[in-house]
Amino acid sequence: MLDVVIVGGGVAGLWLLDTLHEAGRHVLLLEKGELGGGQTIASQGIIHGGLKYTLDGLLSPSANAIREMPRAWRDCLAGARTPRLTQTRVRAEYCHLWRTRDWASQVGMLGARFGLRVRPQRLPRAEWPAALRHCPGEVYRLDEQVIDCAAMIAELAGRHAPRILKCDADGGLLFQPEAAGRAGGVRLSAGGRTARLQAGVIILAAGAGNAELRRAAGLDAAAQQVRPLHMVMVRGALPELNGHCTDGARTRVTITTAQDGADRTVWQVGGQVAEDGVNMSPDELVAHARRELAAVLPGVPLTHAEWSTYRADRAEAAAGGRRPSDVQIRREGDVLTVWPTKLALAPRLAERVLRELPPAVHAAGRSQVEAALRDWPRPRVARPPWEAERRWQR
């Protein structure tokens, strides 16, 4: 008998696993695909502090919820609080913020100064990154770290390997509730083996997979919404850049930098470009992104760069198609469905869930269960989008 079974191995599920284990709960995590293989690995890895939610000059509920997160993550990355993520690579200690030339953009920049724990700091031109040397207006530094999401997932997973189990993608997980609103247990299958896990609480933390899981558990799948993105990647001899270009009350582009397995520089490009691209083909989006980057990064040569795209879904609690302002927890008896809403909000979600749970009652049997499942298959960590097989174009 377990205190908790978590279904879903992205940042939400793994952070919950660490938090609940540290709090003395007997907990296992189940994953049918790759760890982090949905929203987490598709993320740009920015630990947002609320900037993008204050561009209209107001402290929105979204900004209020997220503004403490940069400090929480910074402490974890420094090993000052759990989960200790000292082996997670920080790609950048801060982002840059710049604007387009128009007057509305300047108003947006002023709005970005209000209500933030992490506030933009105006930089002298000598400190501007090379990619922004020819931009009009001003450049700011924003102390939002950028992390390597794959490394973060690998570190959390490595710490909890005995508590993470793989199940078959098709039919590998069957809910066996005791009664309406009672968690009961799950029947787990992998590679021809089966096991039954009984739990006091089941937590669904599978991102886009939550809808299917809710249906399987006899719950309403309409409790979830999905807002799609179509992200852009650029690789080649590119300058390092991590930051946001604002245009009025929107983030026109958000660019983060990584290195691929062949030591090539790769930009991930999100923001409004990724919103615009939802109804575009990859070729149409690449053409659109070329124009946008030429406009917001004058003087950066992209003639010889290679371009590709990937799609990602932002799975959230249903909010009429709007972005929820905070983490969301839906409790139905002993089943909790959780959505962090943003990568940066994972610590906040874990704290909220811990407060929802009853005291630990099954910790004494932890070692026996883990020993019985020692040889069970384990999921691997997902590869970043730029390492997957996909078409690139010049």
Image (cartoon, rainbow, N blue to C red):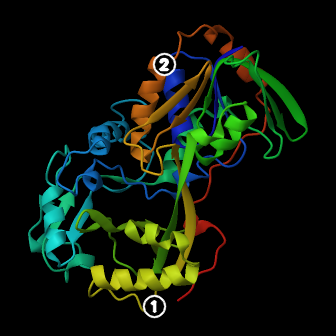
Disc 1 is placed on an element classified as: loop
Q: Which mark is residue 223?
A: none
Q: Residues within 10 Å of mark 1 (few under 14, many from 20)?
A: few
Residue at the outermost left position = 124
Horizontally, is 105 left or right of 13 in the view? left
Mark 1 lies on residue: 304
Q: Residues within 10 Å of mark 2 (few under 14, many from 20)?
A: few
Disc 2 is placed on an element classified as: helix
Residue type at mark 2 is Glu
Residue 33 shows in the view: yes
Disc nearest the viewer among 1 and 2: 2
Measuring 28% from the left and 45% from the top, which residue is drawn there?
A: 63
Horizontally, is 51 left or right of 375 in the view? left
Q: Quadrant of residue 81?
A: top left
Which mark sits nearer the N-terminus, 1 or 2?
A: 1
Horizontally, is 273 left or right of 392 in the view? left
Horizontally, is 168 left or right of 88 in the view? right
Q: Which mark is residue 356?
A: 2
Image position, residue 341 (x, y; %): 45, 44
Image position, residue 7 (x, y; %): 65, 34
Q: Nearer the viewer, residue 47 or 257?
A: 47
Residue type at mark 1 is His
33 up-or-down from 306: above or below: above
247 up-or-down from 298: above or below: above
Q: How many marks?
A: 2
Residue at the outermost right position = 192
Q: Nearer the viewer, residue 99 or 178?
A: 178
* Quarter of the image that includes the N terminus: top right
Measuring 54% from the left and 72% from the top, which residue is drawn there?
A: 279
Image position, residue 186 (x, y; %): 77, 26
